[in-house]
Image (tube, helix red, strand yellow):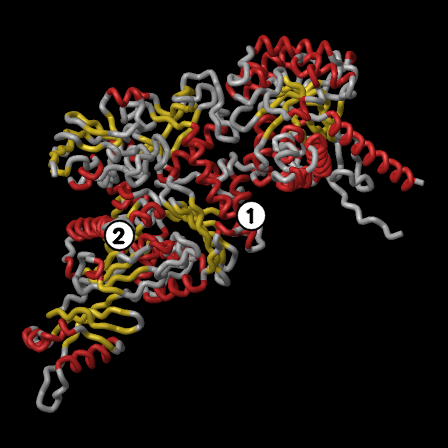
Amino acid sequence: MEKIKVTFYPENKTVVVAKDATILTAAISAGIYINSSCGGDGVCGRCKVIVKKGRVLTQLSGHINAEEKKQNIYLACVSEAQSDLEVEIPQQSRLNLEGLTQEEVSRRLKKDYTEPEDVERIDTGRKPGFKRRPFTRKFYLELPAPTLEDKLSDLDRLERKLNTQSGLAVSHTSLSSIKNLGELLRSSDWKVTVTVGKKNNTAEIILIEPGDTSGRNFGFVFDIGTTTVSGQLVDLTSGKILGTKATYNKQAAFGSDVITRIVYAKNGEGLQELYQAVADDMNEMIKSLVTEHHVDLNEVTCATCAGNTTMIHLLLRVDPTYIRREPYVPTLNFVPVLRASEVELRINPRGLLTCLPGVASYVGGDVTAGVISSGLDRQDELSVLIDIGTNGEIVIGNKEFLISCAASAGPAFEGSGVSNGMRASSGAIQRVSISAGSLESSYAVIGNTKPLGICGSGYIDLISEMLKAGILDKDGKVKELKNDLIRKNDNVREFIVVPKDKSGTGGPIVINEADIENLKRAKAAIYSALSILVKHMGFGFNDIKKIFIAGGFGTYLDMEKAISIGLLPDIDKRKFEFIGNSSLSGAREALLSEEASLKADEVARKMAYLELSVEPGYMDEYMAALFFPHTDLSLFPSVRK
Amino acid sequence: MQELMLETWSGAINTVTIGATKEEGGTRSRAIKVGGQKTLPFLFPEGELPHKSVVAFEVWDTPPADWPKNLTDAYGDSLKDPLKWAEKCVKDFKAQLIALRLQGAHPDFGNKTPEQEAKLVAEVLKKVDVPLIILGCGDDAKDNIVLPACCEAAKGERCLIGSAVQDNYKTLVAAVLADGHNIIAESPIDINIAKQLNILISDMGLPLERIVVNPTIGALGYGLEYAYSIMERCRLAALAGDKTVASPFICFAGHEAWRAKESKATQEEFPEWGPESERGIIWETITATALLQSGADILVMRHPEAIAKVNKYIDNLTISSSVERRADRV
């Protein structure tokens, strides 16, 4: 087999691959992650690279225009290496793992700041917090040494002391902890710290250490999203958050949506690759957080994950195939407590891993987490939780009942599938206003840098402002106005938000009619799902007393503008509350409180699920919502003016 | 006798006037009004149905290539000359309304220029004095230059011009607005798109009273019942007060019915189906009468015999009802 050297710039990293391997494959081998939302099908056009030297065999693609062709720009996924190559990967084509500054991360995750803070204060006093009782607890024990009168065995002695001191009746201790117990107890002068974990309704001694380490007990929480993985290091003794990190889900290289990934999992080593991608994300995060906060990995005794059902299957390496096949039944919703080492999470090798329980194939533990974090299940009055992500989940209910549904919104609000879209990281435009006469945009950029693209909240502002300024018709088409900011490109009309000279990408930042179509579909999917769910329960929007909005919408979300484009229903704006990443905060509640964890189980069991794909009115609702703000303008009186 | 349970509706269908008489600045012998209903089709006791549905004869600017023989036979040689064809419809068949389809403008069917088509429109208007519907060729780019030219040529005659579709409506709306015509808004059997398009058009300043909706229909056996359900839903919404879906309907019954195999196939092919000379006419008639029951205000049809039958059907339904109504009052 002929071998070929591919060198990537600016990393200056060289890998050897077989001839005919795609540049995308070579990049993954080199550990460089290129955007590839379509999973390498040549469809999404996000993996553009510049071939500086060497020959490639490529396929024609509508994503490469004549200008780009001249610059030797190719799609990495359909271009096969024919000779040694030198390839430059432009900024836009990267899955930029370091894109978020610490400050951005903290603002983006809203309440999941990096500043340490008491867990009791998280819920802003709106509702009682859960009683703190972390998943793993450490007890410092001073045992009486055995005598001829007290000849209890070492292990019985330990358990007796633990029971009298903590009230816990231990039902299991692993052999590896027992093997050297005799030596350990005697060398530590009968003073040891025992770590006890709750494992499926039983207490287990997971660790016995010499001396008093009871003040050093830490845990991790993760929100595993289709697009973003967030992690947090928590001090289990004090309940304080030590640090929060977010990174992109490396699985994105294999497909931007869960369906593509489920299909990919069936593909040879696909499941293992997908697992490895997310495990790497989590381990990288663990490593950097423990280093920053001077925590010994041995002191990290448990991890709690919330994620959609597919993400959890992939993390556990459980075949996700049946999630996408009718009648859409997952292999598991309730995940038993596992050893973290079983999924190769690099914490204390004897540490435990728990996952928040899911409800159905498309309503996962992230939603359960959102419910317990928002307190939806404890509300007296009718409330709604909307988690706006690639898969938009909606829960309606109160302390009496809960019902959920999932709407396939697509990744447009996360900045994918739109020409100048990006995630809410440094360089993203997140706030826009357009001046009525000149149609010039003024905008706010995350990190106060030159703009590189537009994130979800930026798009909401932008569409709302374009409608207001008369640039868009209600169908989302750009009007033919005499203005240099409106132009036609490849027969598609577009609006220039940032002219070339002010942008950080070297070209102008635009929004075109195809982008608006994608955003329109995303907002229609969310709105119509909510509408169907509310109607299904026999309510109207005005019966709703509170709406919690969760999701990765950057640091800000203008509710009024979200209403004006028809993403959210036109009800009193004071009823809305933006709660940031509720999946992560819910996972943290479960980690820190046995009560919250039991609550999550109860919520998942209690929550009903409405399958929209078989709901007769859904398609009609969706079509009606494919308009700004809606085909039925009477639903949006405040927008109508 | 037990009293009828009557529904009272708050809304009404918009009234659209097609054609302008001398007094109104045009040259038509009469103007035709459609719409204005305050109840569902033919429910006379329940509300006003002020205007009868009308049938328009379809006339092409170029001899239709795909019409079956039993249809072309009805017009003979006149098919070769749109002026003669239109005149024949009015003189011989007593047409009240002509729908001139500019198929010859299509790049694949003659590629006639906007000037040629505008001239034809002017000549047809001179030749016949009934109100005129002008239909484009279906090629968006071409229609966008041909139809504005025709609008201008027919200025003042208050024609009905079509079709505006969701992805291509702006040019036509602007032309119709400038030259005082009415517009056909076409949607693909979808109540939401029908409504969206009406809103988009009225947002450009054309009043809702100048829009006629083509809901797109299927012929008998080809989705007619689906078309029925969409038209009924539109009507129910309109009568409940939604002005944006309260447009009269135009239905291309002839176009759809004559595409059906059942209209075109010869007796040799399907002996058990009977002679095609009657079958096509029946297919068009049944399609059209079902559409009347669905709420069609304007039917665009092809075969003179089918049209005669449908006109008689309309007369029968409206006469008997006025008798009943008179009886009620007594």
In the figure, is residue A631 to the left or right of A95? right
In the figure, is residue B22 to the left or right of A439? right
In the figure, is residue A330 to the left or right of B215? left
How many neighbours does mark 1 have within 10 angstroms: few (below 14), some (14-19), or many (20 or more)? Answer: few
Q: Position of residue A530 (x, y in %)?
A: 50, 48
The residue at 12%/88% (across/down) is A151
Callout 2: chain:
A
In the rendered image, is residue A122 in sight? no
Q: Position of residue B320 (x, y in %)?
A: 86, 37
| Residue furthest to the bottom | A149
The residue at 24%/77% (across/down) is A171
Give the tally of numbered discs: 2
The quarter in which the C terminus of chain A is drawn is top right
The quarter in which the N terminus of chain A is drawn is top left
The residue at 30%/23% (across/down) is A507
Q: Which mark is residue A617?
A: 1
**Label 1 residue SS:** loop
Closer to the camera in the image, A276 or A594: A276
- Determine which residue is flagged by label 2: A271
**Nearer the observer, disc 2 or disc 1?**
2
Could you tell which of marks 2 and 1 lies nearer the N-terminus? 2
Q: Is residue B180 above or below residue A42?
A: above
- To the question of a shared chain for discs 2 and 1, the answer is yes
Q: Is residue A567 above or below residue B182?
A: below
The residue at 38%/62% (across/down) is A600
Splitting the image into 4 quarters, where does residue A599 fall?
bottom left
